[in-house]
Image (spheres, coloured by chain):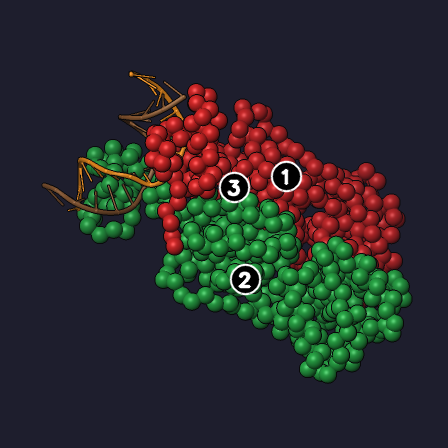
Chain colours: A green, B red, C orange, D brown
Amino acid sequence: MEKHPVTIKDIARQLNISVSTVSRALRNVADINPDTKKAVLELASRLNYEPNIMAQSLVRRSTRIIGVIVPAIHSHYFSQALSGMTDVANENNYYLMFCQSNETYVQEVSSMKKLLACNVDGLLVSVSKETKDPTEFRRVKEKGVPIVMFDRILPDFPCNRVIVDEYEGAFKAVEHLIKKGCRRIVHIAGPEGLSISENRLRGYVDALGKHRLPVDEKLILRCKAFEEDALPLIRKVARLRPLPDGIFAINDRTAVLAMKYFHSHGIAVPADIRIVGFNDDPISEVVEPSLTTVMQPGYEVGKLAMGILIDEICKAPKAEQTFRLKTRLMIRNSSR
Amino acid sequence: MEKHPVTIKDIARQLNISVSTVSRALRNVADINPDTKKAVLELASRLNYEPNIMAQSLVRRSTRIIGVIVPAIHSHYFSQALSGMTDVANENNYYLMFCQSNETYVQEVSSMKKLLACNVDGLLVSVSKETKDPTEFRRVKEKGVPIVMFDRILPDFPCNRVIVDEYEGAFKAVEHLIKKGCRRIVHIAGPEGLSISENRLRGYVDALGKHRLPVDEKLILRCKAFEEDALPLIRKVARLRPLPDGIFAINDRTAVLAMKYFHSHGIAVPADIRIVGFNDDPISEVVEPSLTTVMQPGYEVGKLAMGILIDEICKAPKAEQTFRLKTRLMIRNSSR
DNA sequence: CTGTTAGCGCGTTCAC
DNA sequence: GTGAACGCGCTAACAG
């Protein structure tokens, strides 16, 4: 039952006019007889005509496709951002192609190549935890393909960026712990070099500084791969003497892991030790005690990033900016 | 700095040969002088030549793009499935376009139209909770575009399907409750008409039947919109006399909502009432007490669905099948 | 206002 | 083995 899809040629033939007239009638172009236009539109809808986007993009040199690369599509935060992007893309008649790097640099680069081969009009990227080298991104930009980075950005690569104000979020979180009376606050930090890790770390350090608390290197523990390798670090925290009285964790999964560990080892949260996470993952509301955390507006990040990219595609180039969305401290029982 | 991308024409000119020779050299075609082939390949890689996929698909009548429509991209389960699809698509050199219906039929249909305009080679669909009418899907199929449905299928629309064995999952869950001594088991069911709702309900009913327990209509409560409207139903459950001793909920979020409600109203889980959910959402591991639930292999569903679609695109048509992936009952503390 | 012509980048005959 | 010519579906420049 594979019928040949209907083309403007078919319409032209049936109406005894030329294809270019049909083409003009179908678009909103001046210089077209209202009657012929009406005839074309009628026949088109009767025939269920759908323009062939590929052919259009070939000649227009614009596909209306936007490529998106994230470390992991599952992941509460990124899936929210993708959802926001999808909605904005839809409203503006753009198509989305998704790739995931699975946190590796090679997959990130190969995804980018594939997307470029598709002639995407723009790229939305959140880099993998391995990515340090901006060369490939520069190359893309030089080809005239705009890139907007979101969430996980590359400091050495100038472009429009949409991030959440992680620094301020971390600062507020740690200050909150301090106001609750914590004096020895551990930070379980993220992988080195990642913008999000460093910004949160800076927020931690500066909050301590503001309140004249010493920054003790022994209280700063680094994950290499986010939560996957957090358990040994948590054990280490539990063995510290004197026991710390606060933890600021790089994300909620790590924080919850810590809470569970403490619970099964007779350390009470928040009585003995208060904990704050980051992300406002659904688990943080549900865990016992519920987890204080820094909410990042993932959906809004996605919407904004897509909006900015579309602007950059359509309009005259503006100066590159970094947009910072505010976080919100969600105070729950793990720190009361 | 917007350089014109390099085309086979450029290569042909520089090598003083014709474009068709270049085209042949670039593909794996017989009848080509090894030397010219080598020369072409060398120059191509030196010039960083990338074939224009749009032009290729225009002439090949195949885009290697696969369209995916899900109710919601965020949602732990679907984002896992999308992740599986992405990985398989990548391995097979297919591109993915994602759309979300936001659980509405209109958005579903409009997404499908857009994807068709892009000449997708195939469609992967999980229907919205509003979708009943298979007409639009039939139309697509008649155009020769294969559709594989996954998870939320349309019973009246014959096609290849990948689902999890929800019936068996529900059956095992309820049987587990019965073996734990429950005799008055409530089912908080999903929206009417959805395949997943009905299959889980059947599993519930049949498990009761097998163990000669009566099916009491008053113990079956329907959500209209999954967890959004579950709270009133949960209140109703708490007021039932005698109090039920077991709950099988349509999903984990509903189950957790119930647990929290019971906890704050002096009903103990699992002592007074045992609870089982569905999905193995991350929250179920974290909640207190941890939630017994039915694990669905979302990532695998995505992989399999994509694999089957690619098969259908490439190979001779086979009989349409329904693939059922097994669930796994994750027994935790809410039912011990 | 409309038709003719010429591409967009590539694959595919068919002669040579 | 190779090149010329044509077509995929559509837009754009120009002439009328």
Q: Which amino acid does label 2 sit on?
A: Asp
Q: Which chain carries label 3?
A: B
Q: Is residue A323 positioned above or below B300 on the image?
A: below
Disc 2: CA contacts within 10 A as few (<14), some (14-19) or many (>=20): few
Residue indicated by mark 3: B95
Where residue D14 sits: x, y (%)? 16, 45
Where residue B87 sits: x, y (%)? 61, 42
Q: Is mark 1 on a helix, strand or loop?
A: helix
Q: Which amino acid does label 1 sit on?
A: Lys
The CA span between labels 1 and 3 is 14 Å
Residue indicated by mark 2: A156
Q: Which chain carries label 2?
A: A
The N terminus of chain B appears in which quarter of the rendering? bottom left
Where residue B259 sits: x, y (%)? 77, 60
Where residue B134 sits: x, y (%)? 51, 39
Whether pointer 1 and pointer 3 mark residues with C-beta atoms closer than 8 Å, the reply is: no
The residue lying toward the viewer, choosing from A269 and B19, is: B19
**Residue B253 can be seen in this image:** yes
Q: Residue B303 carries which label?
A: 1
Disc 3: CA contacts within 10 A as few (<14), some (14-19) or many (>=20): many
Q: What element carries label 2?
A: loop
